[in-house]
Amino acid sequence: MSRFNISTAALAAVLIAWALMGQALVPNWVPIAALVVHVALAALGVAFLEMQWFGPALCRCRSIAKEVAITFDDGPTPAGTPAILDALEQARVHATFFCVGSRAAASPELVGRIARAGHLLANHAFSHHPLTNFFSDARLFREFEDTSRALEQACGKRPSFLRPPIGLSNPGVFRAAARAGLRVVGWSARAMDTSSSRPERIVARLCRRLRPGAILMLHDGKLPPGAMATTLRILLDRLRELGYQPVRLDALLSREKQGKTMRHPA
């Protein structure tokens, strides 16, 4: 049961108690306060995926190793993706690309290059519409399924992970993701590279939230190619200095599972 469902059940219990017992035992302000809290938490849950208000979202792995996953949203982009791939290849590290389905369908050769380089492809919905959070369950499923199909056609493999557009969520997102066979993923460190183009500031912001098992989120195509290449070089150098190894998201999750097995042997 999600936290949203628990909150809804608690609100229903308060309203039932108020209706049955009357304001002598349950003052009028109690159900009003319960409703306000419920709505406020739901609004925060929409905007902050890490609250996991509507369902379980992977925002950080519990890793004992100093490993992190670097992820990129909104690609592939003909102007931005090659610079990212070149920087990653030069550093010999792998990352995870949350691809917009329409862009993947328009640039299957770029999707293929990402896959051939050993990076992980993941789902970021088909249209990346700003009102995705208001879509019906059926339309959300089409958004996710069409993206998975576009990625599969380009590289021969369906994705396993989904990051909702703009990081917004609601119960329908989780229902549609489950139907499409996708695990919802958030982040633990956000570059905010859509509002800043200064590489040093972007890297400093990411490193403030750096922990073993962290999931770092950047964007493909928001920075000029030169600025993105510089940002990645600075970030990868900083991670190396701090003793961190970037890995794909599935590899990071696999390490978490291995750690649980070691701590709780059969």
Image (tube, rainbow, N blue to C red):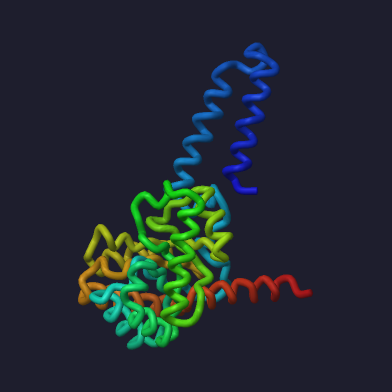
Residue 202 vs residue 118, the one in the foreground? 118
| Residue at 41 percent of width and 67 percent of height | 216
| Residue at 47 percent of width and 36 percent of height | 40
Q: Picture coordinates of residue 115 (x, y %)? A: 42, 83
Residue 244 vs residue 187, the one in the foreground? 187
| Residue at 50 percent of width and 79 percent of height | 157
In the figure, 138 relative to 231: above or below?
A: above
- To which quarter of the image does residue 230 belong? bottom left
Task: Residue 218: tell me if it is visible.
Answer: no
Task: Name the image quarter holding the C terminus.
Answer: bottom right
Q: Picture coordinates of residue 232 (x, y %)? A: 31, 76
Q: Picture coordinates of residue 252 (x, y %)? A: 53, 74
| Residue at 47 percent of width and 77 percent of height | 152
Q: From this viewpoint, which residue is outermost toward the top?
A: 24
Task: Residue 173: tell me if it is visible.
Answer: yes
In the figure, 256 relative to 43: above or below?
A: below
Residue 129 vs residue 83, the one in the foreground? 129
Q: Picture coordinates of residue 77 (x, y %)? A: 28, 73
Question: Is residue 23 toward the left or the right of residue 145 in the image?
Answer: right
Residue 232 vs residue 224, the one in the foreground? 224
Number of numbered callouts drawn: 0
